[in-house]
Image: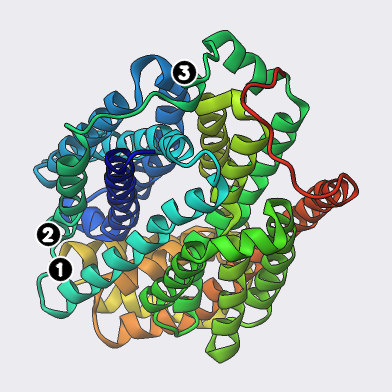
Amino acid sequence: MTATDSADARRLFIGACFALIATSVAFATVGAVMLALKRDFVLTNQQVGWIGGAALWGFAVSQLIFAPLCDTLGMRFLVRLAWLGHMVGTLVMILASGFWLLFAGALVIAMGNGLVEAACNPLVATLYPDDKTVKLNQFHVWFPGGIVLGGLAAYSLDTAGLGAWQVKLVLILIPTLIYGVLLLRQPFPATEGVAAGVGVGETFKAAFTTPLMWVMLIAMAMTASVELGPNRWVPAVLEAGGMPGILVLVWISGLMAVLRFKAGPVVRRLSPTGILLSSAILSALGLLGLYQWGSGIMAYAAATVFAVGVCYFWPTMLGVVSERVPRSGALGLGLMGTVGMATVGLITAPQMGRVADTYAHERLPVAESVDLFARAETELADMEKPDAMAALAAAALVGREHAATGDLPSPATANALRAVIGADVGDLSREAGAILGPADNFGGRVSFLYVVPLCLLLTLIFGTMYLRDRRAGGYRKRDIGASV
């Protein structure tokens, strides 16, 4: 590379990092304002679920559509679409007047997030063809890094009394404007596949007929489930156990960012397949620890082991595909992201929620809950606050169902307790929190246990790959010029 080329590569890499920061801030911020949206717009849980769920499946749909077109349309075109998605989606949500605009805005933001991955993963692979796994890890520093920045900014806004949900959404626009300045007018190289003369048909052939690609897609569904499924739950579960959830999230994300930034020596010492094997083992130990300890210093220790375990999964999986199945190009990387995000959004997260609800309900004390609902019907009857009226309706419903069945109904009981907590009516809300907190903490911890078998399967898959590499004399990259 010439000096100019090197300077251009650095600008493109930095711009891509800011684009990923925008993605992670959007991912974290949209999730953080869900409760406020529910209250301000009087949304049902189902409507809130549709808005929050768009962050996962909208990302997957975007990658599925545009990753195969990356070679044809060009990476800069996809980055420009991503920038429009972040700008327009955020503004639509800020100015929304009801559910449909909120949902549309969240979906457009999510598709912008997917476009960033569809364009920037192959961009990094193209800029650094001899160091893909290391540079992809350093690029993906900024997903947890952006969560740290966004989390601390949101926490500071709340502390300063400026925590309106619209203000928090504005945080998305800051990195969006920065990567727009850096990238929108900057020349982009051709993708690695285009530069090597690999046609679209050859790309599809490499992606769908290479056995290793199928192994990696199956493994990606599991590694994404192990990382993103529990990671979304850890702060809420530990908060239910009395720990500061936002600070736990910042700690986990900050640790992941530092470790990814220092990925170079780790990759050289362990090799990519060695990293994946170690990650599977550490993730299992971390999840077992989070199941065992729901609060206190040991919970922090378990969360730390879990963060070390999962931090290298996503970028190293992409690096292995780019190095071992290079002719799959942007399509291969896009398929990996699509499978990972879609699996978490459509299967892992809902199933973890189902497990958590089931086991949390079993831990709810019947007598204390029934007594609280009876007092709620009396104490909330004269209040005109919408939250109090909603809590009254929920408490009355559970009371009637309990009288009819002789048992607490699920999940109506937990939802009724949450409604009483959300009404913020003094001692009654605090008592509801004291009843629900330990139950939610236990249910969430059991859901972590249900993910551990995936770690065991991954240990088998990556252990086999690692041993095969050792027998072959070490990890070997495949040249993009080699045919499938």
Q: Residues within 10 Å of mark 2 (few under 14, many from 20)?
A: few
Tell me which numbered mark, 3 or 2, is placed earlier along the sequence: 2
Task: Give the image quarter of residue 329.
Answer: top right
Q: Indicate the secondary structure of the residue bearing disc 3.
A: helix
Query: What amino acid type should be assigned to the residue bearing mark 2?
Result: Val
Q: Residue at x 56, y 77 (%)?
A: 304
Q: As displayed, is residue 250 above or below residue 130?
A: below
Left or right? Give the position of 233 relative to 108. right
Q: Residue at x 11, y 78 (%)?
A: 160
Q: CA distance from mark 3 to mark 2?
A: 42 Å
Q: Nearer the viewer, mark 1 or mark 3?
A: 3
Q: Is residue 405 visible?
A: no
In the rendered image, which residue does mark 1 sit on? 163
Q: Position of residue 95 (x, y in %)?
A: 9, 43
Mark 1 packing: few (<14 Cα in 10 Å), some, or many (20+)?
A: some
Judge from the rendering whether residue 480 lies leftward or rightward of residue 65; answer left or right.
right
Establish if 476 lies above or below 154. Answer: above
Q: Mark 1 and mark 3: span between their CA atoms?
A: 47 Å
Amino acid type at circle 3 is Val
Which residue type does callout 1 highlight? Gly
- 33 vs 49, left or right, is left
Q: Quadrant of residue 157?
A: bottom left
Residue visible at 61% across and 29% down in the picture? 326
Separation of disc 2 and disc 1 at Cα?
A: 7 Å
Q: Would you name the residue on which mark 2 appears?
A: 167
